[in-house]
Image (cartoon, rainbow, N blue to C red):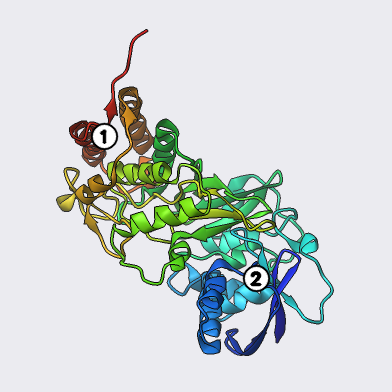
Amino acid sequence: MKYYLMNKNKELMILQQNDDDFLFENDFILLNKEALPFSIYQDFKKNKTHKEIIKGINEWFSTRIVPNYRDNKDSIFEEYQVRDGYELANKHYALSLSDQYWLKPLDENISWEDINYFDHDYDGKDFFEATYGKDSFNTLNIESTSKSKYTTPNNTLGGQLKKAWIKVNNENYLLKGSGTLYAFEPINEVIASKICEIINVPYVKYSLKKIQTKRQQTLVSVCKCMINSSQEIIPAYQVLQEENQLMHSKDDFYVYIKILEDHGIQNADEKVQKMLMLDYIMLNEDRHLNNFGIIRNVDTLKWVDVCPIFDTGRSNNCNVTEKYWDFNVGEVKCFTNYLISSEELLDLFTISLQEKTFERLKELVQVYNQLLKENQSYIQLFDIQIEKLTEGFSRRIDILYQKLMEKNLIKKSTSR
């Protein structure tokens, strides 16, 4: 099958896809290099070979499939009668809510305005129930549509955790579950968004939703889509491809900041440092290079801003047995594929925070405690564990305050 690779209504390449495994192969025709997906554009810019470019196209496409390591992939593939995520992604033009790229058959007369999920309704029920269980969609108290079940952005929704897009009042919402030992990631997402509000950094706002079926009850986080129909998300991993070699160490922080500043991102250093301060407080184990990045305007190709902070669920020792809970040092990721001591983040902090900021952060301790207790029937925690988590969260705020004091990075509040 041959397709145009499209960016909205721009024809970027003509590609040939194998009908058996849905991988791209053989020849391609380049039509518009500048508007290509960023990683593919970098391959052309670096004069990679034909074979390497095809490999890069397939690697890019692999990020928009339901992976075989998805917790519930079997029920999804059975519902949609597909053998894997590649086949599912091709069911409706490989459209996504993370960018504006899609595959247009050469012989089909259709435009992006006709089919995109930012402007059009789509089926949410079938994928949602394949993910969360029979009758789970009823919990949402919204009406299903008459659209084909294959008409959904969930076809291209990657990642390990159970998740699904739904549309409510013309807004796209992502509902995401848990996959760790104690299953309180959704609560961590809510607290992370409250921290971001206090330290004044762009963030995705999260709330909680309870889903119940005859067989199970599930707590999920809920957030709106972070981009609009003229934008795309470029993850940090692709951004760093502007450089020929990654060190996969926290030293890549400086390379990343320079790239962002060179592309006109305002206050990039401050925003990324504040993201890492959030990770320090919450001991975020999952800030890998696809969990942050930048937003680009697909019409002008101008870099707009950093992505608002998202996906901070795997934090606060939620995937570590209680015996090994460590709130004094703990481990995080920082431009690495592996965990490092949270203390290594301190080397990167050069911006100041107000003393009153920490006063507001301390107010979240009770909020965190209350959220854990209110949702105790949905998470795997006893009362004594909730108290330990609350005390640990409070301690992390105190430790960051003390460390920033030692670096003269606390601005004292002034009275009028």
Return the residue found at the far bottom: 26
Residue drawn at (61%, 68%) of the image: 155
Q: CA distance from mark 2 to mark 1?
A: 43 Å
Q: Amino acid at mark 1?
A: Ile
Residue drawn at (70%, 65%) of the image: 151
Q: Which mark is residue 397?
A: 1
- Residue 132 visible in the current orientation: no
Badge count: 2
Residue drawn at (36%, 51%) of the image: 183
Q: Position of residue 152 (x, y in %)?
A: 66, 63
**To which quarter of the image does residue 338 belong?**
bottom left
From the viewer's perspective, is residue 97 above or below residue 45?
Answer: above
Q: Amino acid at mark 2?
A: Ala
Front one among 78 and 392: 392
Query: In which quadrant is the N terminus drawn?
Result: bottom right
From the viewer's perspective, is residue 144 above or below residue 46?
Answer: above
Residue at the disc numbered 2:
94
From the viewer's perspective, is residue 394 above or below residue 90?
Answer: above
Q: Does residue 385 appear to the left or right of 106 in the view shown? A: left
Q: Position of residue 226 (x, y in %)?
A: 57, 49
Q: Residues within 10 Å of mark 2 (few under 14, many from 20)?
A: many
Residue drawn at (66%, 58%) of the image: 298
Sequence-earlier tag: 2 or 1: 2
Q: Does residue 28 appear to the left or right of 106 in the view shown? A: left
Front one among 291 and 318: 291
Q: Position of residue 334 (x, y in %)?
A: 31, 56
From the viewer's perspective, is residue 260 above or below residue 396?
Answer: below
